Amino acid sequence: MDKIIIHGGRRLEGEVAVSGSKNAALPILISSLLTSEPCVYQGIPQLVDINTALKLLAGLGVVVDKESWVKGGGDIILRPDRVRNFEASYDLVRTMRASFLVLGPLLARFGYAHVSTPGGCAIGTRPVNLHLKGLAEMGATIEQVHGYVEAKAKKLRGAQIYLDLPSVGATENLMMAASLAEGTTVIENAAKEPEIEDLAAALNKMGARVEGAGGDLIRVEGVSSLGGLTHRVIPDRIEAASFVIAGALIGGDVLVTGVRPAHLDAFFIKLKEAGIELSIDANGVRVKGNNTIKSVDVTTLPYPGFPTDMQAQMMVLMSVADGVSVITETIFENRFMHAQELDRMGADIRLEGNRAVVRGVKELSGAPVMATDLRASVSLVLAGLVANGTTEVSRVYHLDRGYEHIEKKFSKLGAAIERVKG
Ligand code: EPZ
C-alpha cells in the first residue's frame, strides 16, 4: 500500500486549481441510467471513486468512453442505451456507498432493481431507511433480504415525501426516481447542498422538471422520458476548503482558484473568526498564513451549516490554535478517528461523545500515522505539512478516493511531500 511522506515546515506559496466535485460527479454520472441517449460529462476528477462508479455503470450495461478522463481531460461519455443488468453487487456498494444511488434511476426507468445495502463504514452506520421509505411512498415494493434491496414498481407515482433528516443521498435517489414518475413529487426537508443543485441542473438539461433544488422543498414533475445532455460538474468545495486550511496552517500566500466562494460561506465565517486573513473574489480565495490562529468552537450541520466533510481539517487548524476549541460532530456518529492520530503528533484532543475538546499546542511533531477515512486522511497530510519533522501517512488509498493528485498539488505549492509506492 502506498504511503505519503511529508517533511513539515515548508511555507506554501502559489496557486492551486480545484478539481471537479466528487460528490456532484457521482450522482450525476449515475443519473445517466435515466435515459437511453448519450450523456457527456465534463470536469470529472480523476479519483478512485469515479473509477468505481464507471465500473458499476459498465456492469449494468452502460457503454463507458473514458479516454479523455483517463488522460486527465475530465470528459466522460456514457451510452446507456443497452442497460441489461439491474444489480449492484455487495462488493461494489461496499467499496463505494454512493453506488446505492443506482436504486432510484433503475427503478424509475426499468421498474426493477436489486441493490446491495451499503452497510456501515468507518464513520458510521450509514442507514438507507430514508431512501427506501421515499421509494415505497412512490409505490415501489421493497424487499430486504440477504443484505440486498429488491425493489419493483410498474410505474412510480408522485408522492409527498418528508425526510426526517436532510439526507444528501436520499434526496438524490428520490429526485432521480421522481423525474420519471407519474405525477408530481414533493420532497420536504430536502438536503440543500450545492451538489443537489448540480444534480437537479443536470436532470433538467435531460428534460426533467425539478424545481427548488438547493432549498428544503423540492418539487419534481415526472415526465415520460429523458434525453441526453452535456454537463460540466461544479468545483469541489471540500477540496478547495482543504487547501485553504493548508494555506492558513503553513502559508505563505496561497491562491485557491476555481472554487465558488458562495459554496463555503459557513466555513469562511469560521476561518475569519479564527483570525485567518482571507481575500475572496469570483476567481477564488487567497489565504495568508502569517496569522495567530484563534481557537473557535465548530458544530457540523447540514448545508448551509459548517460541513462535516471539513471537520477533520478544521481540527488540525484548531490543534495549533491559541486556546481551547470544542468541535461538535452532529452528522456522523464516529467521525473523530483522526483525533488519536493527531494526538500521536503532539495534539491535545479529548473526545467526549460527539464532542472533541481541542487544546491548542505550540507545534505538532512528525510521526508515522494511519489514514482511516477520506477526510481524516487529508487532515493527517495537513498536520504533516505544519509539523516539525517527518510524517508518514499510511493507507493513502483513502486519500485517493477523494483527492486528485494531492501530493502533486501540494508539492507545486512548495511542500516537501512525496508518494512512496508500497
Ligand atoms: C453524502 O453522504 C456525502 N457523500 C458525504 O461525503 C457527506 O459527508 C454527507 O453527504 C453529509 O454531507 C456523497 O455525496 C457521495 P447523508 P450521504 O445521507 O448521502 C443519516 C465524503 O467524505 N441517514 O446526508 O451518505 C446518516 O446516517 C463523504 O465525501 C439516515 O439516517 O450522507 C448520516 O448520519 C463522506 N438514513 C446523516 O443522515 C438515511 O436513509 C447524513 O447522511 C440516510 C442518511
Image (tube, rainbow, N blue to C red):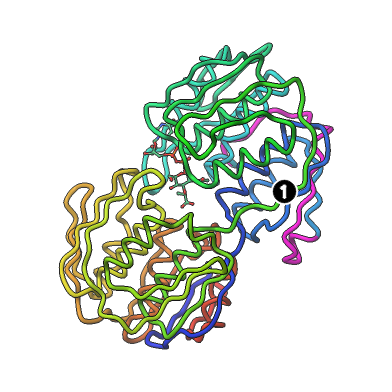
Please report the residue visible at 19 percent of the width from the left and 72 percent of the height from the top.
360
* Residue 74 is a magenta residue: yes
In this rendering, the answer to whether 264 lies above or below 87 is below
Q: How many marks?
A: 1
Q: Position of residue 393 (x, y in %)?
A: 42, 71
The quarter of the picture where residue 320 lies is bottom left
Does residue 306 appear left or right of residue 146 in this picture? left
Quarter for ligand 1?
Answer: top left
Q: Position of residue 233 (x, y in %)?
A: 65, 52
The magenta segment: 68-91
In this rendering, the answer to whether 420 lies above or below 375 is below
> Camera-side residue: 176 or 393?
176
**Residue ranking furthest to the front:** 281
Crowding near the residue tagged with mark 1, few <14, some 14–19, many ≥20 C-alpha atoms within 10 Å: many
Does residue 233 appear left or right of residue 65 in this picture? left
**Quarter containing the C terminus:** bottom right
Please report the residue visible at 62 percent of the width from the left and 31 percent of the height from the top.
210
Please report the residue visible at 77 percent of the width from the left and 47 percent of the height from the top.
230
Q: Position of residue 240 (x, y in %)?
A: 50, 65
Does residue 287 appear left or right of residue 422 in this picture? left
Secondary element under disc 1, as helix, strand or loop, is strand
* Residue 15 is a magenta residue: no
> Camera-side residue: 376 or 179?
179
Q: Position of residue 316 (x, y in %)?
A: 31, 68
Please report the residue visible at 38 percent of the width from the left and 69 percent of the height from the top.
380
In the rendered structure, which amino acid carries the disc numbered 1? His
Query: What residue would you read off at disc 1?
Result: 231
In this rendering, the answer to whether 252 lies above or below 60 is below
> Camera-side residue: 20 or 55?
20
The quarter of the picture where residue 260 lies is bottom right
